[in-house]
Image: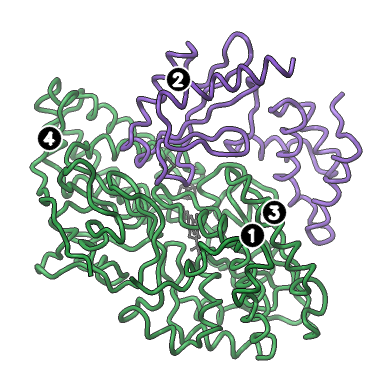
Amino acid sequence: MVKFTDDKLAKAKEIIARYPMGKHKSALLPLLHLAQENFGGWLSVEAMDYVAEILNIEAIEVYEVATFYSMYNLKPVGKFIFEVCQTGPCMLNGSDNIIDYIKQKLNIGVGETTADGLFTLKTVECLGACGYAPIMQFGKNYREHLTKERVDQLIEECRNNAATNN
Amino acid sequence: MGIKLLLDKAHVEGIRFYDAYRREGGYRSVEKALKMSPNDIVEEVKKSGLRGRGGAGFPTGMKWSFLAKPEGVPRYLVCNADESEPGTFKDRYLMEFLPHLLIEGLIVSSFALGSNRTYIYIRGEYAWIVDILEHAIAEAKANGFLGTNILGSGFDCEIYVHRGAGAYICGEETALLESLEGKRGNPRIKPPFPAIKGLWDSPTVVNNVETLMAIVPIMNMGAEEYAKIGVGKSTGTKLISACGNINKAGVYEIDMTISVEEFIYSDEYCGGIPNGKKLKACIPGGSSVPILPANLLLKTAKGETRYMNYESLADGGFATGSMMGSGGFIVLDEDQCVVRHTYTLARFYRHESCGQCSPCREGTGWMEKILLSLEKGKGKMSDIDLLWDIQRKIEGNTICPLGDAAAWPVAAAIRHFRDEFEWHVLNPEESQTRNFGLAHYADPIHVPTV
Ligand SMILES: Cc1cc2nc3c(=O)[nH]c(=O)nc-3n(C[C@H](O)[C@H](O)[C@H](O)COP(=O)(O)O)c2cc1C
Ligand code: SF4
Ligand code: FES
C-alpha cells in the first residue's frame, strides 16, 4: 500500500490550501510530484489512485494528467536518472556526443535502465540552460558544461553514493 | 557600459536574501504604489511603453486595462515562468539571482490589478528555483510586504509558486491556466480571452517574469524616465540570453540601442565566435522566430545596420527579417548544419504539440521525419517542396500559436538555406561528414569597444 507519511500528508494539505475552496484539483500537479518523489521515482497506478483519493477526484482525471507531462515517470526508473538535453542549442555544443558517450559507457539505450537498477538515461527537450550547454538534469539540479570527464566523474559519484547507502 | 535596470544589483553579495535586497533599496516601489490608486499605476505602465517580454511584445499597460472587473468576482495575476522556448534562459537567471525583484514586481502588479492570490507558474525542471522563490516569499511576508493589510493599506495578497511538470505548451497562456487548474495543458479556444475568462473562469492577466520585474524600475524612476531609455517603441531594457557558438554565452541586459554586430562581437557582450570561425546564421529571438543568414542579420535588406530592438529585428518581415521574440539568441558558426539544427527544432515541436489540432499534431511529426531523412542524406529534391507545403498548411490553421512556432523555423531555413538542403540531396555521403551551403558568411569582425 502506498501512503504518505504524516509529514508528507501535512505537506499535501498545505499545498491544497494554496488554492481557493473548491478548486483543490489545482493541487494535482504538485501532489503528483510529491508522490513521485516519495514512491520510488515513478507513478504506479496505485500511487495515482492514492492521489485521486486525497483530492477526491476520479482516477481517470489523474491518469490523463500524469500521461500528458513528461516529468512523470510511468514505469520504474533507476536510482539515478540522467536527462540529457538534445535540442538545437545543446546540439550546437556537442550534446549528441555526450548522449552517445553515456550510452556506450553504461551500455544502455535512451529510455533504458542499467541491469543493476542504478542508472536510467533519458533525452529531454530544452531545459532552459542553453548557455551552459551541453547539460543534463540530475535530480533537482542541472549538471552543466558536460564533458566526457564530467560524465565519468558523475557516474563515479553515483556508484559511490549507492555503495555507501546500501 | 549599457544601462541596467534589472541586473544592476545582481552581483551584490547576498542580494538573493531580503536584508541585502532591502538595504539596496528593495521594496520601495511597493511603498510608493500602495499610496497610489490602482488605475494610476496602470496608466504609468501604459506611459512607460513596456511591452511583454514573454515573446509577443504586446503592450503591458494595454493588456492590464483590458482586465474585466465584474463586482464580487476575484481577479488573478499569474506570472508565466514556464520558460521553455529553446534558446531562452533569462527568466531562470532573473529568478535564481533576484527572487525578491520578482516578488516586488508581483506585489505592485497584484495591487494594480486587484489580485489577492497571485500564482507563479514555473516549469517543473526549475525545481531548485521553487525553493529560492518560496524562501523569498516567506521573507517578504515576515517583513509585512505580503499577507493581510500590507503596510496598513488594506490590500491583502498572497503569492504561491505552482510547479509544472515538463510541457513547453504550458507556456502558452491558456494552456498554462488549464495546467494550473490541474488539467492537461491543452490551449483553449480564444475568445474569450483570459482578461475576461481566465483562471477558474475569473478575469486573469498572464505576464512574463521579466515583464513583471520591469514594473519595479518603472515605479521607481517614473514612466517618463523609463520610456526615454531605448528607442521608438522599444522602451526600457531587454534581457537577452545568448547561446550557441559564441565565446561568452550568458544573460545580458541591453538597452535596445546597440547593433546586432556589437552584441555578437564586442567584449562587453558575446565576445565573438570561438576559434576565429565565421558567423553563419542566427536565430535572434528563441527557436520559433525565423533564422537569418549572417548578411541579413547584421544588415537589413536595405543595407541598414540592424539593431537589437523589436522594430529593427523585424525589419523586412519574414522575407528578410526576424523577431525579438523571447530574446533567446542562438548563434551558428560556419561548421554548423542548418538542416540538422532545423531537424532538432522540428523534433522539439513534434514532442511538445499537445495534439488537439490535426495540422499541428500530424504536420510536426511529418516535418520531423522529412528533415531527418534529408539530414541523413536519404532525402529527395521533392521533399524540400513538400516540407514547404506542410509548414504552410500548419501556419494559421491551429488553435494556438505553437503551430506557427513550428512552421516558421522550417520556412525560414528553406527560404534562406535552400542550397544547403539541396546539397544534402545531391551529396548524400559527403553531407554526413562536411557541412556546406552557399551561406553568406560574415568574416570575423572586431568592433572597437567603447
Ligand atoms: C507555444 C507557446 C509557448 C509560450 N511560452 C512562453 C513562456 O515560456 N514564457 C512566457 O512568458 N510566455 C510564453 N508564451 C507567451 C504567452 O502565451 C503569453 O503571451 C505571455 O506569457 C504574456 O506575457 P507578456 O505579455 O508579459 O509577454 C508562449 C506562447 C506560446 C504560443
Ligand atoms: S497548435 Fe498544436 S499545441 Fe496548439 S492547440 Fe493545436 S495541437 Fe495543441
Ligand atoms: S537547448 Fe539544451 S538547455 Fe536549451
- Mark nearer the N terminus (4 vs 3): 3
Please rate how many residues cluster around mark 2, counting C-alpha atoms within 10 Å: few if below 14, some from 14 to 19, many from 20: many
Chain where mark 2 sits: A
Q: Is the residue marked by circle 1 packed among few (<14), some (14-19), or many (20+) residues within 10 Å?
A: many
The quarter of the picture where residue B410 lies is: top left
Chain A, colour shown: purple
Query: Gap between marks 1 and 3, in whole Å?
Result: 13 Å
Q: Residue B113 at what x, y percent from top left?
A: 65, 78
Check chain identity for marks 1 and 4: say if they share one.
Answer: yes
Q: Which chain is green?
A: B
According to the picture, the residue beneath numbered tag 1 turns out to be B120
Check disc 1 and report its element: helix, strand or loop: strand
Q: Is residue B419 above or below residue B286?
A: above
**What amino acid is at disc 3?**
Glu
> Which residue, given by chain and number where applicable, does mark 3 sit on?
B181
The image position of residue B339, as x and y in percent, is 23, 36
